[in-house]
Image: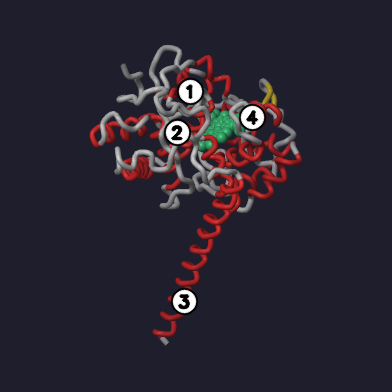
């Protein structure tokens, strides 16, 4: 009897293992197919997989170890590091300009005031400067840390990161207008993405990043109130609006936040898209995706987690190529917050 139970349990375990295996195989296959279709199996001139294979062979393990340690200690860092990469790439390209501590820098601009994760990048850079000094760009560290911030919960990378980016020397708050507004309508969002060489698929897939992390109440309250009165955005589900109001009263205390994915806020899953279909997108820009027929069809497709992971991976790679400095352009900073001499 006992051994029969064990055998059954063993078969059950095998079944779970096999299901997980098939799931990953499907992700990888879907991913390769979509990459091939988009020509992404070739690397970008100047960028390469394993760019630092000879010059800093331990790069991947150093970034992963530090990022996983920090995310384990503070799960909020997962969303912060992912957003940091996005805000870096959209302003001046993926050149680590967001990290610079100079007067009137990008960091000081309104949309970047709630960006974080800088200290994780500093910790990685400090370690790398001991192991392979003057070699790895801060821009590449930002891209790798974003991947590993997400990979922590899977203990496996969802996407591969090309490296070989170099660091910029200019960081201006006045350039941050390139970031999309959370109050933008569909056309505004699409324009902001196409200005960076990204298309409708990228817009919808990358918006799925809002499956983790938080927004300041001030990014949401304009959908709930007008002055002292309640005035709920008609695109918002009434019950979800009440939940948001509980978290973000009028007025909301300074610094208060609300989860972007009301259901599974720390899980990197496809529930963001399920939420959108129920009119439970948290930001007006999330809800805007349902206002365009083609985007709404993609939202439907990406409710399938395997399709979401494949599409997200592909679009992250595209985003990671935006206006990169390679070859002899830019520089390799020794300290990510300061331009090198
Ligand atoms: C489609 C246009 C987008 C708009 C308008 C937008 C806007 C925003 C806003 C307003 C917040 C909350 C900030 C705050 O209020 O404190 C936020 C958070 C976040 N965004 Fe986006 N975003 C967009 C696309 C993206 C993309 C492409 C990514 C990454 C690939 C991303 C990743 C995140 C993450 C992870 C958070 C949570 C950050 C945290 O928990 O600290 N967003 N976004």
The local crowd at label 3, few if under 14, some if 14 to 19, many if 20 or more residues have their Cα within 10 Å, is few
Q: Quadrant of the N terminus?
A: bottom left
SS under mark 2? loop
Q: Are marks 3 and 4 in contact (CB under 8 Å)?
A: no
User: Residue at left 43%, top 52%?
Assistant: 156
SS under mark 3? helix
SS under mark 4? helix
The local crowd at label 2, few if under 14, some if 14 to 19, many if 20 or more residues have their Cα within 10 Å, is some
Nearer to us of marks 2 and 1 is: 2
Q: Are marks 3 and 1 in contact (CB under 8 Å)?
A: no
Lower position in the chain sequence, tag 4 or tag 1: 1
Lower position in the chain sequence, tag 2 or tag 1: 2
User: Residue at left 52%, top 20%?
Assistant: 110
Residue 221 falls left or right of residue 170? right
Q: Pointer 3: what residue?
A: 11
Residue 177 location (% of width, % of height): 58, 19
Lower position in the chain sequence, tag 3 or tag 1: 3
**Beta carbon at label 1 within 8 Å of ligand 1:** yes
Q: Are marks 4 and 1 in contact (CB under 8 Å)?
A: no
SS under mark 1? loop
Nearer to us of marks 4 and 1 is: 4
Count of numbered badges drawn on the protein: 4
Q: Pointer 2: what residue?
A: 46
Give the distance between the C-alpha atoms of the residues marked 3 and 1, in whole angstroms.
52 Å
User: Residue at left 69%, top 41%?
Assistant: 279
């Amino acid at each position: 009897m006992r051994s029969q139970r064990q055998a059954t349990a063993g078969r059950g375990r095998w079944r779970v293992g096999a299901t997980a295996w098939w799931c990953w195989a499907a992700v990888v296959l879907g991913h390769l197919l979509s990459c091939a279709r988009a020509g992404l199996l070739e690397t970008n001139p100047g960028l390469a997989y394993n760019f630092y294979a000879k010059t800093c062979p331990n790069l991947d393990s150093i970034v992963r170890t530090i990022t996983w340690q920090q995310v384990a200690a503070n799960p909020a860092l997962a969303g912060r590091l992912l957003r940091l990469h996005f805000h870096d790439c959209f302003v001046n390209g993926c050149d680590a300009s967001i990290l610079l501590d100079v007067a009137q820098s990008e960091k000081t601009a309104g949309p970047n005031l709630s960006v974080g994760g800088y200290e994780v990048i500093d910790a990685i850079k400090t370690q790398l400067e001991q192991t392979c000094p003057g070699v790895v760009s801060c821009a590449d560290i930002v891209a790798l840390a974003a991947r590993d911030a997400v990979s922590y919960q899977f203990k496996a990378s969802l996407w591969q990161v090309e490296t070989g980016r170099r660091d910029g020397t200019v960081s201006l708050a006045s350039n941050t207008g390139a970031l999309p507004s959370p109050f933008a309508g569909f056309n505004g969002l699409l324009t902001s993405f196409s200005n960076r060489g990204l298309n409708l698929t990228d817009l919808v897939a990358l918006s799925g990043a809002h499956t983790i992390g938080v927004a300041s109440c001030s990014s949401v309250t304009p959908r709930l109130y007008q002055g002292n009165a309640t005035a709920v955005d008609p695109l918002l589900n009434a019950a979800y609006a009440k939940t948001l109001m509980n978290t973000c009263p009028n007025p909301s205390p300074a610094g208060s936040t609300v989860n972007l994915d009301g259901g599974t806020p720390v899980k990197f899953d496809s529930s963001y898209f399920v939420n959108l279909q129920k009119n439970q997108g948290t930001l007006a820009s999330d809800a805007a995706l349902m206002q365009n027929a083609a985007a709404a069809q993609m939202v439907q497709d990406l409710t399938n987690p395997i399709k979401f992971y494949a599409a997200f991976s592909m679009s992250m790679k595209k985003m990671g190529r935006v206006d990169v400095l390679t070859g002899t352009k830019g520089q390799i900073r020794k300290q990510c917050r300061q331009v090198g001499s």
